[in-house]
Amino acid sequence: MLVDFNWDAKEIFDWFERNRRYICTEERPAWCMEPTIAGSVEAVFESDEVDDACLDEIYNYRLRHDLRFAVRGAKIPSVYFGCGVAGGEVSAVIGGEVFCISVNFSDFYFRLGAQKKYISERVVRNYLEEQ
């Protein structure tokens, strides 16, 4: 389990929609040297040879690709959505271990849209009503 609390689904859906183009098409940055996005971010943060310009670039990348930025204030690990070495990737570093799965983002966004519709049809006074 990634987390054990409820999030505002609208904020998450909005973040995914706002960053769709980046998640689906933005190429891996030059600083992304590890096999995964999450591993690359960790490696850069552990490096002593990173300048401010690179840190700014990583921050801007994370705004568009790190789910943690969709739920600001929540204490969750960074989960990255983006173009990996072999296509769509979702990756994270949890407890020092790198996790990565391949994702077809066309299918992902189709299913995300279906979930958004399902949830929005069942929200009454800001609460999801059980059927």
Image: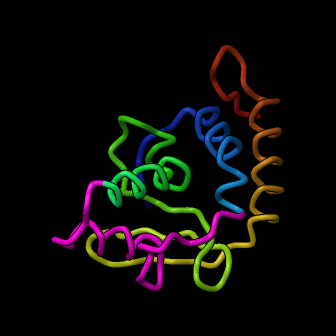
Q: Nearer the viewer, residue 53 or 75?
A: 53
Is 121 colored magenta in this rendering? no
Q: Please state the horizontal and vertical placement of residue 28, each as a whole percent of the image.
A: 56, 72
Colour scheme shown: rainbow
Is 46 colored magenta in this rendering? yes
Q: In which quarter of the view is residue 130 placed?
A: top right
Q: Please state the horizontal and vertical placement of residue 41, each as a whole percent of the image.
A: 37, 68
- Give left or right: position of 107 versus 72: right
Q: Quadrant of the N terminus?
A: bottom left
Q: Residue at x 50, y 62 (%)?
A: 80
Q: Residue at x 68, y 79 (%)?
A: 87
102 over 80 or under it: above or below: below
Q: In which quarter of the view is residue 8 placed?
A: top right
- Number of residue marks: 0
Q: Quadrant of the C terminus?
A: top right
Q: Nearer the viewer, residue 41 or 102?
A: 41
Magenta extent: 25-52
33 over 37 or under it: above or below: below
Q: Please state the horizontal and vertical placement of residue 101, each as a whole percent of the image.
A: 57, 77
The residue most toward the left is: 48
Q: Residue at x 26, y 74 (%)?
A: 96
Q: Please state the horizontal and vertical placement of residue 89, each as a whole percent of the image.
A: 60, 73
- Give left or right: position of 107 versus 60: right
Q: Residue at x 71, y 62 (%)?
A: 24
